[in-house]
Amino acid sequence: MRLQFLLLLFLTSIINAQTKQREIKELLTKVVPLAVQQYTRLEKATPDSSMPRSFTAKNNSLVFSDIKWWCSGFFPGSLWYIYELSNNASIKKMAEKRTWELAPMQYFTENHDLGFMIYCPFGNAYRLTKDSSYKSIIHNGAKSLLTRYRPSIQSIQSWESSSRLSCPVIIDNMMNLELLYWSSLNGGSPTSREIAITHANTTIKNHFRSDFSSYHVIDYDLQKGTILKKVTWQGLNDSSSWARGQSWGLYGFTMMYRFTKNEVYLKQAQGIANYLSSHPNLPADKIPYWDYNVTDDKMNFRDASAGAIMASALLELARYSTKADRVKYLNLAETIILSLGKSEYLSIDGESGGFLIKHNVGSLPHKSEVDASLTYADYYFLECLQRYKKWYL
Ligand code: GLY
């Protein structure tokens, strides 16, 4: 009897996995032409040397940013993914044009966001074209980021000091390590990967709690090399789990395992994945609220960007994990992707000013971009589709 039950369970899980795979295949046939249309519209609406930043249904208007905004790289990066998925020549032209508009950012040293601003556009451009002129921009971007490394705290400083924070390092900073590591493996300085490893190790030591949730900001005393405080900037409170920060951590440690094959990073990523997947406040459609600790109904906005980043990371983590974990991570990623593909989250043609994904939160405590379309949600959703197609179809 027990054997029959286990067999039934096994067969059901295979059928479920096959169903989800088929549904994502169907989703791809719908999203790719939609993305071509939406991003063509968005590109036309965007002034030269500006990038689309957000859209809110309430104001029914697009907001643009200059190239110094931390998100400027996501629009060209998304265009590269759409080109990869569609093979559409005019999208490729747009991707090239918008990528080159960001070239001045290779020398930017005012914050840590070089990974997003340089690696997302130029990294994808090089991956898809092998044009070496993109590569030199990536190496220069890595050099600029290295100027922010602070030996006394074994970390890269995220933001400049302010009246509230002395030397802030945020969990998001894990994402910039991809630029450093890739550069170092592709003709850049070996120092880049040494610093990436040092930063990742300090992050494990100082950013994480025993349950694998993470603080958003660690504020350091640069002179003494000590921690001043562990706080939040975009989360509900200092001890809460800000949703996008948890996703950045998951993605960052999965990516560090890809490069190093260091089991410590794999365990860290799996610990985060297990914490998130079993969190009692993760809704049934697996799209997180903007903070896992939100309980107030008036504040329970979803952050689809946190879901998209988590799903993209889980697609990769599943490939490095053993059978039971692999099934769990892949299943969760598939659920998130399929939720994002439903009309609740996915814009229809002509909606959201050209963006794809609705219902994201930039920073709720700052009342900024609450329930908006945001470039990084689209970028990681498209990355999910590109990764799923490449690895699982
Ligand atoms: N790096 C800023 C954010 O995730 O909002």
Image (spheres, rainbow, N blue to C red):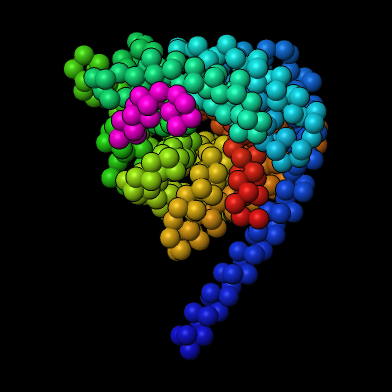
Q: Nearer the viewer, residue 324 or 167?
A: 324
273 relative position to 150: left or right: right
Q: Quadrant of residue 110?
A: top left
Q: Residue at x 49, y 79 (%)?
A: 6
Q: Given the current orientation, which residue lies at the most extreme bottom position?
A: 1
The answer to whether residue 187 is magenta is: yes
The span picked out in magenta is: 183-201
Q: Residue at x 34, y 33 (%)?
A: 197
Q: Quadrant of residue 376?
A: top right
Instruction: Tally the numbered discs.
Output: 0
The answer to whether residue 390 is magenta is: no
Relative to residue 241, is residue 198 depicted above or below?
Answer: above
* Residue 250 visible somewhere in the drawing: no
153 relative position to 375: left or right: left
Q: Quadrant of the C terminus?
A: bottom right
227 relative position to 59: left or right: left
Relative to residue 309, is residue 11 depicted above or below?
Answer: below
Q: Residue at x 60, y 46 (%)?
A: 387
Q: Nearer the viewer, residue 28 or 216?
A: 28
Find residue 273 and report its horizontal and vertical position in percent.
43, 49
Find residue 159 and report its horizontal and vertical position in percent.
40, 17
Q: Given the current orientation, which residue lies at the most extreme left position?
A: 224
Relative to residue 210, is residue 13 depicted above or below?
Answer: below
Q: Magenta stretch mostly in which secondary structure?
A: helix
* Residue 44 visible somewhere in the drawing: yes
Find residue 53 and report its horizontal and vertical position in percent.
64, 22
Find residue 372 and report its horizontal and vertical position in percent.
63, 30
Q: Residue at x 72, y 50 (%)?
A: 27
Q: Nearer the viewer, residue 272 or 183?
A: 183
